[in-house]
Image (cartoon, grey):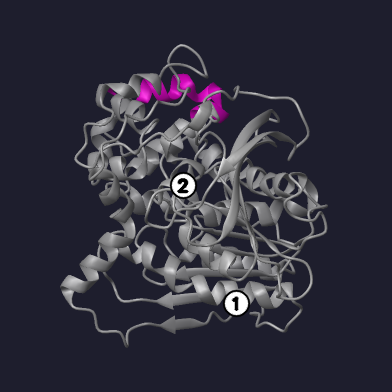
């Protein structure tokens, strides 16, 4: 496959400008929070002490709110999120409850987009076959759709938010603190409806199952079902999926699972950007780096989805490592960056091995391998985007995923943006914005039957 690479080297950034751009992209929400008095985030339930839904996360309160950045506010009006049970009965996509919400850009609770927003709790299926509650937000422009045909529905899976209850995009969106506001606003400006899932365990009492391929894919597809079941969007409306980073993995997993898990949603296309298609490769890149906390998010998620590894984790983590798991179980991204950036994970284990080295061993290796994306070609056209110099999710895994999909018959448009090196994490975050409009334009063309470019296997 020939991969087009769009070079951005013609832009000449000063060292200061590069640092400012990357820092703002990653930490702007945190800066807003640190200037505002906030409540300590309520910890999620989950962990490996006592029981599968045990006390690991509850113990995280020992350090909550004491980082340089501070905790995010836990916005839970009328107990909408905290009142949900760990498991529910119902069909995937079935509505459990709804409530009014709004979409704030910059100023809390002020909506500049003239849209109607509702938070929703809906049924999804996790990787253990259990039916669980997941939350999200559905937004529909008030103005009639004039783009031709039925109003499309864009289902957005969020990038990494953290692992705690306060991190749910549906909680942050009304406060003006959610960075996924960028694709949401861009889609609303086109007259599209948008459904933003919180994914499993963000906001709800259960632990977030970070980077669990099946959980994230199912929650994304069930978000589409829920939006249509709310009757905010016609049942026959064309659906497109969207996500970058963790959200890119969720979107990619959903695209792979759609034909068997949710064939009725009228899925037409999708965007998967910065995809962590190979967790082994990603863990190597982030270990001992600014996003070292994500390894804690991952292990905590594995402990909930696979309780049989509890003893293996407990025996391999020393006291410092267990405290790291307790804290990361209920932290949001700004707090994790302040606490755990550049943590030498060799100091967290009884053997002195890094967490990446542990993940290469059983019983963890089979769990990491099970999250691999690329082996199940989607049945709809897909735009895959990445940054050539991504320092967090190495580009090689997206290249391999796109190649596997194309060889399996998927119509893939793969594009790399060759942006000059900036600062740690900046090389991962900036392509999220440079792909935004090109990817939306491409999806729009697919949705309206216009010709679009594809790469050949």
Residue 43 rendering spot, x and y as whole percentages: 40, 26
Extreme residue toward the top, this view: 50
Quick one: 453 or 436, which is closer to the camera? 436
The region drawn magenta spans 303-318
Q: Is residue 240 above or below residue 360?
A: below
Residue 75 image-quadrant placement: top left
Residue 442 image-quadrant placement: bottom right
* Residue beneath the point at 71% across and 74% down: 146
Quick one: 112 or 426, which is closer to the camera? 112
Extreme residue toward the bottom, this view: 10
Disc 2, SS = helix
Disc 1, SS = helix
Secondary structure character of the magenta stretch overall: helix
For residue 133: magenta?
Answer: no
Q: Mark 1 Cα within 10 Å, few/some/many (few <14, many 20+)?
A: few
Q: Determine whether, in the image, residue 289 is placed left or right of residue 168.
A: left
Q: Determine whether, in the image, residue 127 is placed left or right of residue 51.
A: right
Quick one: 332 or 127, which is closer to the camera? 332
Tell me the distance, in whole angstroms, between the alpha carbons under discs 1 and 2: 27 Å
* Residue beneath the point at 60% across and 67% down: 402
Residue linked to disc 1: 441
Name the front one of labels 1 and 2. Answer: 2
């Amino acid at each position: 496959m020939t991969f087009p690479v769009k070079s951005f080297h013609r832009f000449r950034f000063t060292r200061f400008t590069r640092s400012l751009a990357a820092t703002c992209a990653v930490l702007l929400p945190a800066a807003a929070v640190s200037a505002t008095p906030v409540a300590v985030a309520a910890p999620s339930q989950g962990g490996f002490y006592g029981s599968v839904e045990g006390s690991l996360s509850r113990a995280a309160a020992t350090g909550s709110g004491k980082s340089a950045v501070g905790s995010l506010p836990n916005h839970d009006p009328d107990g909408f999120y905290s009142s949900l049970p760990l498991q529910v009965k119902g069909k995937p996509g079935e509505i459990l409850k709804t409530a009014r919400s709004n979409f704030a850009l910059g100023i809390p609770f002020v909506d500049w987009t003239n849209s109607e927003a509702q938070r929703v709790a809906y049924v999804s299926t996790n990787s253990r076959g259990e039916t669980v509650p997941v939350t999200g937000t559905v937004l529909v422009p008030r103005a009639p759709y004039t783009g031709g045909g039925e109003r499309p529905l864009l289902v957005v899976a969020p990038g990494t938010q953290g692992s705690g209850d306060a991190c749910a995009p549906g909680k942050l969106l009304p406060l003006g603190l959610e960075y996924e506001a960028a694709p949401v606003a861009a889609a609303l400006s086109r007259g599209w409806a948008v459904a933003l899932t919180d994914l499993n365990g963000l906001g709800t009492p259960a632990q977030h199952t970070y980077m669990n391929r099946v959980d994230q894919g199912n929650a994304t597809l069930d978000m589409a079902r829920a939006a249509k079941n709310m009757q905010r969007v016609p049942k026959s409306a064309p659906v497109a999926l969207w996500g970058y980073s963790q959200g890119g993995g969720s979107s990619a997993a959903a695209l792979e699972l759609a034909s068997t898990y949710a064939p009725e949603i009228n899925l037409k296309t999708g965007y998967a950007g910065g995809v962590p298609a190979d967790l082994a490769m990603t863990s190597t890149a982030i270990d001992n780096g600014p996003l070292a906390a994500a390894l804690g998010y991952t292990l905590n998620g594995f402990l909930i989805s696979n309780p049989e590894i509890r003893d293996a984790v407990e025996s391999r983590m020393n006291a410092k490592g267990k405290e790291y798991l307790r804290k990361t179980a209920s932290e949001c991204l700004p707090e994790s960056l302040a606490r755990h950036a550049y943590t030498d994970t060799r100091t967290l284990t009884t053997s002195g091995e890094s967490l990446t080295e542990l993940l290469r061993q059983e019983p963890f290796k089979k769990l990491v391998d099970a999250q691999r994306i690329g082996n199940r070609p989607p049945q709809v056209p897909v735009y895959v985007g990445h940054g050539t110099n991504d320092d967090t999710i190495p580009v090689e895994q997206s290249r391999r995923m796109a190649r596997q999909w194309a060889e399996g018959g998927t119509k893939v448009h793969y594009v790399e943006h060759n942006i000059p090196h900036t600062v740690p994490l900046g090389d991962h975050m900036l392509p999220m914005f440079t792909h935004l409009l090109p990817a939306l334009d491409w999806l729009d063309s697919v949705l309206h039957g216009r010709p679009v470019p594809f790469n050949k296997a």
